[in-house]
Image (cartoon, rainbow, N blue to C red):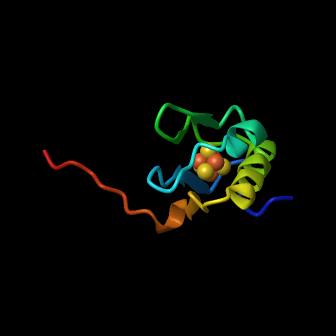
Amino acid sequence: MSQTVDVNGAVDQIYAIDQESCIRCASCSSIAPTIFHVGDDAAYILRQPLDEDEVDQCEAALGNCPTSAITATPKSSLVEITARS
Ligand code: SF4
């Protein structure tokens, strides 16, 4: 079982693409077409993975990206920003 999905099925990683590093090779979109899409200038994330299978696809895409443009950040390391009224 992937360690990026908890027992309730919640994904605990946020995937992102450094568009400056992307060379539009389309490896990610061929591995995980529901998550990654190659646009005119760079690849981008369509949506975050929803289940273990999609997380596995994201991890494969991350591992195969030739420029290491794909990153995965644990949600626990993100800072929540709330607006003050
Ligand atoms: S695999 Fe990496 S370099 Fe290739 S399109 Fe996806 S993000 Fe860009």
| 44, 6: nearer the viewer | 44
- 32 left or right, relative to 72: right
Q: Is residue 47 above or below residue 66?
A: above
Give how far across and how far down residue 13 sits, in percent: 60, 57
Give how far across and how far down residue 32 sits, in percent: 73, 39
Q: Is residue 81 in view?
A: yes
Task: Examine the image and state in which quarter residue 64 appears.
Answer: bottom right
Number of numbered discs present?
0
Q: Is residue 66 above or below residue 53?
A: below
Please state, as top left, top right, bottom left or bottom right, where the C terminus lies in the image. top left
Q: Is residue 8 in view?
A: no
- 84 left or right, relative to 5: left
Residue located 36% across and 57% down the image: 80
Please state, as top left, top right, bottom left or bottom right, where the N terminus lies in the image. bottom right
Q: Residue furthest right?
A: 1
- 63 left or right, relative to 77: right
Residue located 72% across and 51% down the image: 61
Residue located 77% across and 47% down the image: 57
Give how far across and how far down residue 84 sits, in percent: 16, 49
Give how far across and how far down residue 69 sits, in percent: 56, 57
| 61, 8: nearer the viewer | 61
| 23, 69: nearer the viewer | 23
